[in-house]
Image (tube, rainbow, N blue to C red):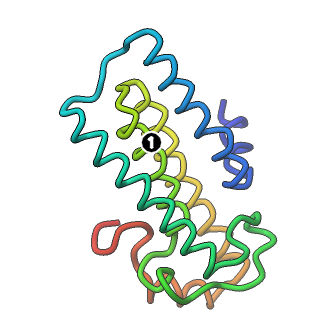
Amino acid sequence: MQKFLNRWLLIKPAVRSVTEIPIIIILGILGEIFSWHRIPLSPYSNIVGGAILLGAFIIHIYCHRIHKQAHEHSQQIDALVQRGIFLKIRHPMYLSLILMYLGLALAWGVVWMLVPAVFFSTFTVFVAIKEEAFMLQKFGRQYEHYMREVRWRFIPKIF
């Protein structure tokens, strides 16, 4: 199992998300077919989920405009991006993925969609931490300086 997780961590995030998002959607479809439990406070939770999902796409597109190599594997990135949202948090692209997972589950409203959404979100945090170790090796002092300047991985003043 550990070997599988390490391999999964090495897959490009764009490829992982193409696998992970359909898993969440399939659970939503199954939830509709089999009338699984719904997330409470519907339709408000659905609206909040939709807003989170929309915000995630906006963040993702904005980050992609700033960081042209964002969908590349870490080894292919040849320069640090230190402008825009990357001046506030170190992993806004991963944040957008986490928000997509959670927003999709809330917007759809099937409780069981939250299980893979939370799992994939947690996994994405581990990927970001593992990537930071790689970036420290690759960029050395430049990345150390970036980490000192931009202290927060995902949410300013929280994490």
| Residue in the foreground of this view, choosing between 38 and 75 | 38
Q: Position of residue 131 (x, y in %)?
A: 63, 64
Q: Residue furthest top?
A: 34
Q: How many marks?
A: 1
For the C terminus, give its image quadrant: bottom left
Q: Quadrant of the N terminus?
A: top right
Q: Residue at x 67, y 49 (%)?
A: 9
**Residue where numbered disc 1 is placed:** 104
Instruction: Say which residue appears at 55% left-offset and 65% top-offset.
Output: 60
Q: Secondary structure at mark 1?
A: helix
Q: Quadrant of residue 155?
A: bottom left
Instruction: State which quadrant residue 67 falls in.
Output: bottom right
Left or right: residue 132 compared with residue 122: right
- Residue 64 position, x and y percent, is 63, 73
Q: Residue furthest right?
A: 76
The relative height of residue 55 versus residue 26 in the rendered view (above or below) is: below
> In the depicted view, which residue is nearer to us: 85 or 129?
85
Residue 71: percent from left, percent from top: 71, 64
**x and y percent of residue 121 in the render?**
47, 47
- Residue appearing at x 46%, y 59% in the figure: 56
Horizontal placement of 17 versus 11: left or right? left
